[in-house]
Amino acid sequence: MGGVTPPADADDETSRGGWLVWGSALSLYLLAVFHRSSLAVAGLAAAERFDITAAQLATFTMLQLLVYAGMQVPVGLLVDRFGPRSVILTGALLMAVAQVGFALAETFVLALLARTLVGLGDAMTFICLLRLVATWFPPRRIPFLTQLSGTLGQSGALLAAAPMTWALGSLGWTGAYLSSAAIGVVLSLVAVVVLRDGPSGRHHRGATMAWASVRASLRASWAHPGTRLGFWIHFSTQFSATALGLLWGYPFLVRGEGRSAAEAGLLLSLLVVAVVVAGPVLGWLVGLHPWHRSSMALVIVGSIVTVWTVVLLWPGDAPTWLLVLLVVVVGIGGPASMIGFDVGRTANPVERLASSSGIINVGGFSASLLLVIAIGLVLDWRTPGSGTDYPPEAFRWAMSTQYVLWAVGLTQLVRYRVRARRVFDRAAFQAEVRAR
């Protein structure tokens, strides 16, 4: 008789606990994006500290992206086996150790190892956050909280722009990176207390997954043209924003466009603001017009190519309004890459969603990796002598390497857009999307 009240109380307690868990996990994702982006405003300082070339500087971000992309599917398996709490805390610990190592490193090799560990810890974060959202909240809230988590998490890059510029100037290299590590330790200690894998227990342990079933799932996912379309959407939209936000934006704005350190920091902050604002808008448009998702991606990539072309052809330094337009349009490409995941979601059955998402996520990060390396190599090629005194002409050559990636990406996007539409009957497809 009196058994009605306890379930209501239990639901309230679960709801309160879910918001606490989500807040703690979100703070660790913010931290991961902060660590990931902290080198964006420290590229020139890193080149001078370790006495390295532009190509060697690009290696920091290259390995970080390589590790991140390569760990997407393995991390998903680790979460299934050991639970999100254990995996996300391990990632936070790895990033704290990595930032301490980066703060104290005096050689290129040690610094390289530290940034590799940042990529490893970063890769363990977002998947865990999404899993915790799916476990703690009712299905009707999951889509909204997933979008909100990704959007709020990107503000971690905002914290790595102007504040890191100030920290490097006021505290020096070692002080700035030790401070970021200390923040990570504090947030991790809070997470140890707050995080639980689910309402029923602090830890979740799953069954060991057979490698044969993993391979079969990956093969089946890649065989579907919808997965490949998602891959090439992710490939084409993301790399320009990633390369600017993670490494080359600050040097390009300071050395290539003659901007002050403060102006460059503000422009990179605006890049993140564009990401945060565009995310919900694109999510709403994709929900309204699922059949035109690839069309949205084509329009966005076309806009990015157009604005970059104007900037690179502008005689002398580009005016402020044009650089503002550049970072806003490029920033929109970041959340536009999420369209690829939605295409993969509607192209694969539930049991293949993890494998298809892992495949698609490799697209943008592999393109970003290639671009980061190419920019560094071209800067070294076009810069007289050695050092980091890159002339504006070198940046025009270096940033032009994006056209190769756009050509490949857009060609494949159009190709698999045609193939995917042949597979789907339009009416049946739209009914399926609404049902999901």
Image: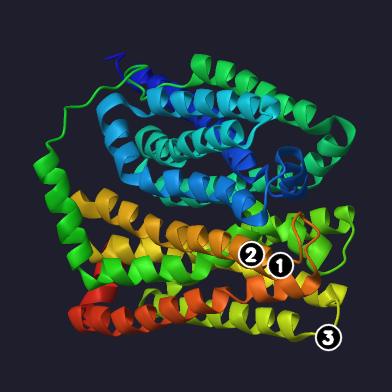
Choose the circle earlier in sequence order: 3 or 2: 3
Is the residue 54 above or below the residue 320 in the image?
Answer: above
Residue flagged by tag 3: what amino acid is it? Answer: Pro
Residue flagged by tag 1: what amino acid is it? Answer: Val
Choose the circle earlier in sequence order: 3 or 1: 3
Residue flagged by tag 2: what amino acid is it? Answer: Gly
Check residue 327 in the rendering and tell me which mark sits there, or answer none. Answer: 1
- Residue 429 in percent (x, y) is at 25, 75
Q: Secondary structure at mark 1?
A: helix
* Residue sitting at the far front: 385
On the image, numbered disc 3 is attached to which residue? 315
Is residue 39 rendered to the left or right of residue 364? right
How many angstroms separate mark 1 from mark 2 (CA)?
A: 6 Å
Q: Secondary structure at mark 2?
A: helix
Who's the residue at 55% across and 79% down the image? 403
Which of the pair 309/27 is nearer the observer?
309
**Which of pointers 3 and 1 indicates the residue nearer the eye?**
3
Contact (Cβ within 8 Å) of mark 1 with mark 2: yes
